[in-house]
Structures are given as structure tokens and as C-alpha cells.
Amino acid sequence: MTDPVWHTLSAADAAGALHTDIQRGLGTADAAERLARHGPNSLPQAKRASIVALIARQFANLMVGLLVAAAVVALALSDVVEALAILVVILLNAVIGFATEWKAASALAALRGQAVATAQVLRDGAAHEIPARDLVPGDVVVLAAGDRVPADARGIQDARPQLDEAALTGESLPVSKTADARADA
């Protein structure tokens, strides 16, 4: 069975699908069982590729192979200038590709560094501060103005918040959110 498309459900339907009481949150035992079943709320820790691997990756594609073949043909025809021009294009492509991949890997590492350390949740009817990595599906997260959202979440109370999504989407302006169900997928 696939998960529902959460933003298309009303808050009550989403809570029902997750067997969550919006007013009381999860029970401590239920939250512990869900943490054991689903694992921690954290980004996967992929090993960062080495500089050598990133450089090698720039030369491991069909287009580079075709350009090398063209350079060899140019050399065979004694057209050294054209062969050198093709090699310069290959190297320039590798430098740009390496820089792009390095910047993307650095941005992902910075995003991991911005992860929220703790979260306020309702458990057993009371607010508790827990490590954000211990959030589980069905937790009722309590947010105040200025808080970072500690996980992918479904709004349940319509306060029309303005969220800063710059770290995730690059959007420079705050984005309005609503607890209403959305029909679009």
C-alpha cells in the first residue's frame, strides 16, 4: 500500500490515517514503537565523493569519449590546432562539471548542518521538547513564530504562516502556507 498524498487530505483525515489524536499527540509507547519501525528523522548520510572521484566522473561519459575520438582523428589528420582545441573544450567541461558537483555537495553538507536540533511535540497530551531526530510519523509538532520546521510536516491549524524555504528551494521570499487540503498533486 502506498502512502496517501498528505497535502490532499484534511488535517483530520491525515491524523486519522496516522492514528494520531490532534489534541493529545502520540503516546510515549506508540512514539517509541514508530521510531523503532521508521527510524530516525534524519537525512541519509551519503559518503561524500573524493576529489579524485569527482574529477574522474567528469571524463566518464559518452560526450567526452566522442570528443577524445574527434581529437585523435584530428591528430591523425595532422590537424594539431583542432586537436588541441578539442582537448581544451574537454578540460574546460571537466572543470565546470567538477565545480558544479563540488558546489552541490557543499550545499547539501551545509543543509545538513542547518538541521533543527530539537522539536516541541505533543506526547500524552503535554508539550515535550525532544531531539528532532526522534520525530516520527504522526507526531503533532508545536511551532512558534521564528521556529524552524524540524521535519516534513502537514499543517493542522490554519494560522496562515509565512515560511522561509530558501534553504530548500532557493525561494528568497517567505511562502504562505495553509492547513487546508489541496486538490493538486
Image: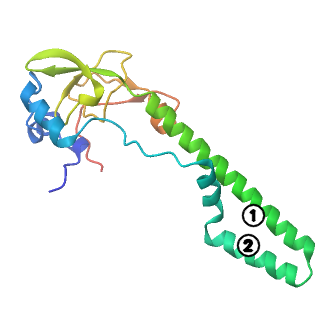
Image position of 37 (left or right of 149): left
Amino acid marked by disc 2: Leu
- Does the CB distance between marks 2 and 1 fall below 8 Å? yes
Percent across and percent down for residue 87 are 80, 66
Q: Kindly state the secondary structure of the residue where label 1 is placed.
A: helix
Protein image colouring: rainbow
Image position of 93 (left or right of 37): right
Q: Is residue 96 above or below residue 61?
A: above
Q: Quadrant of the N terminus?
A: bottom left
| Mark 1 burial class by Cα count in 10 Å: few <14, some 14-19, many 20+ | some
Residue that carries the numbered disc 1 in the rendered image:
90
- Numbered tag placed on residue 67 in the rendering: 2
Q: How many marks?
A: 2
Percent across and percent down for residue 129 are 23, 16
Q: Which residue is drawn at 34% across and 26% down?
A: 149
| Mark 2 burial class by Cα count in 10 Å: few <14, some 14-19, many 20+ | some
Q: Residue at x 60, y 45 (%)?
A: 102
Amino acid marked by disc 1: Ile
User: 178 and 71: which one is in front?
Assistant: 71
Percent across and percent down for residue 51 are 62, 48
